[in-house]
Amino acid sequence: MNLIQYFDLNGERAVGAVDGDVTRQVNGATSVYALAQAAIAAQTGIGALIAQQGLGETVDKAALLAEGRLLAPVDHPDPAHLYVTGTGLTHLGSAATRDAMHKSNGTKTEDNLTDSMKMFRMGLDNGKPTDGTKGVQPEWFYKGNGYTVVNPGHPIPSPSFALDAGEEPEIAGIYLIDHNGQPRRLGFALANEFSDHVTERINYLYLAHSKLRACSFGPELRLGDLPAHIEGKSRIWRDGQVIWEKPFLSGEDNMSHTIANLEYHHFKYELFRNPGDIHVHCFGTATLSFADGISTKPNDIFEIEEAQFGAALRNPIRVETEHPVIVGNVY
């Protein structure tokens, strides 16, 4: 079962349960967040809770997308309590583009490897421990909070100062921290971990800046475990034509880390275990249009799809106008 969130025809929030080609409204549900809280309180699963509440009218998912009424598949009543984070260099083949970017700057280590390649090799060596120990920690970055999340179908804003507006097709894990401070996995979703690769290429230490961008995920939340093999398509549309398309792989069969290892190294920090918070954690990718020399333009449309996750995630690009920042004193 997959879940969506949307506005009904009266402008009220609602939750839909997707089963194949049929989507039906979940009775009495206005948010996945509330459903998850109720499921934890009842010591049951979200699916079981939905079965108890029952399903109502059929929903036209395509119409929701076309009319802009679809929401991200999970959000928080206070957007500041939703974290968007991620890990990089976690997929087989993911080091090639990053390594080439950093070699161009002459950023080498003492053994003639870039830091990116060294970290990638660390993951290959110890990202999937089999003896119960914790594996090596991955590259990690902060992306933003709930205010940076763009609903499916809506434009992803690129700042006026950005040097690039590039997609990153990924899988995101979705988590709620329970009242005991323990992360509870709700499921997984497609994600566009939108980044500025030109800024990152200037200097690896600009990676943090390059990640402070908007993002989008969904449209559907897939309940249950992550498939071991994920093979989707990432596309860019311009003026009604596909100008770039490439497969992307994910799932543990295609990764140098286990999901459990990536989760541990995120949630080991007490900061990320505050009861009631939502976490959207992106697991990385090995596929970028930037690596193929693509430079996006305003109104280009990103499309990321994988059949196991339901509807495709589509967002156009919008370049923002510059807003002057004036720092004043209060003393």
Image: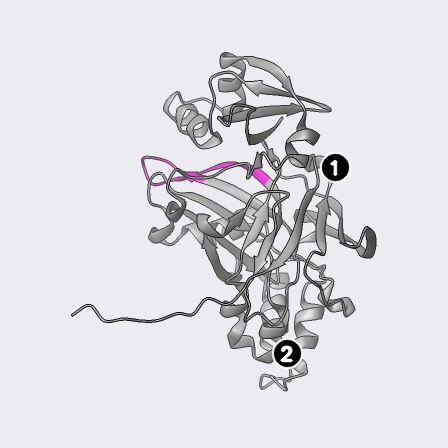
Looking at the rendering, the stretch of residues picked out in magenta corresponds to: 176-188
Q: What residue did someone put label 1 on? A: 307
Question: What amino acid type should be assigned to the residue bearing mark 2?
Answer: His
- Find residue 72 and report its horizontal and vertical position in percent: 55, 39
Q: Nearer the viewer, residue 13 or 167?
A: 13
The mark found on residue 102 in the picture is: 2
Residues tagged 2 and 1 counted as in contact (Cβ below 8 A): no
- Find residue 246 and report its horizontal and vertical position in percent: 80, 55
- Residue 127 visible, this angle: no
Q: Give the image's coloring scheme.
A: one colour
Q: Nearer the viewer, residue 42 or 123?
A: 42
- Residue 171 vs 124, above or below: the answer is above
Question: Magenta residues: mostly which secondary structure?
Answer: strand
Q: CA distance from mark 2 to mark 1?
A: 34 Å
Task: Please identify the quarter of the rendering in which residue 296 is found.
Answer: bottom right
Task: Please identify the quarter of the rendering in which residue 158 is found.
Answer: bottom right
Residue 327 lies in magenta, yes or no?
no
What quarter of the picture does the N terminus occupy?
top right
- Kindly give the residue lying farthest to the left in the view shown: 331
Residue drawn at (46%, 66%) of the image: 323
Instruction: Give SS at disc 1.
Output: helix
Instruction: Give SS at disc 2.
Output: helix
Question: In this image, 149 relative to 225: left or right?
Answer: left
- Find residue 194 and report its horizontal and vertical position in percent: 60, 58
- Residue 318 vs 122, above or below: the answer is above
Mark 2 nearby-residue class (10 Å; few <14, some 14–19, many ≥20): many
- Residue 218 visible, this angle: yes
Residue drawn at (47%, 22%) of the image: 29
- Residue 186 vs 38, above or below: the answer is below
- Residue 62 vs 292, above or below: the answer is above
Q: Nearer the viewer, residue 145 or 171?
A: 145
Question: What amino acid type should be assigned to the residue bearing mark 1?
Answer: Ala
